[in-house]
Amino acid sequence: MTTMIKELRAKENLTQIELAQKVGVRRETIVFLEKGKYNPSLKLAHDISKVFKMRIEEVFILE
């Protein structure tokens, strides 16, 4: 799975820590998501998408 999280974070000037705090996870979870090494739960995908005001499919791209 590819994500747009890193690019979206940069656009919004959010650090990994800030995003992690907004969605209630550890910074390491954001790191793994950005590297494509972790598949999020539906709730986490929803929460991250909500932060960026986008649909889940726009943030998380299935390959």
Image (cartoon, grey):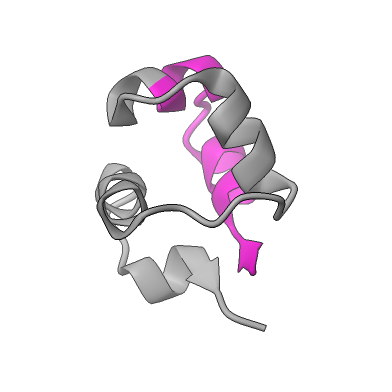
Residue 16, position in %: x, y? 56, 24
Image position of 37 with respect to 42: above or below: above
Give the left or right position of residue 23, taking residue 12 as reference.
left
Image position of 57 with respect to 51: above or below: below
Residue extent of the magenta highlight: 1-20
The answer to whether residue 15 is visible is no
Q: Quadrant of residue 34?
A: top right
Residue at 24% across / 50% down in the picture?
50
Is 22 magenta? The answer is no
Q: Quadrant of residue 46?
A: bottom left
Residue 41, position in %: x, y? 37, 54
Image position of 11 with respect to 50: above or below: above
Q: How many marks?
A: 0
Image position of 39 with respect to 29: above or below: below
Give the left or right position of residue 8, taking residue 57 as reference.
right
Residue 17, position in %: x, y? 51, 16
Residue at 53% across / 27% down in the picture?
13
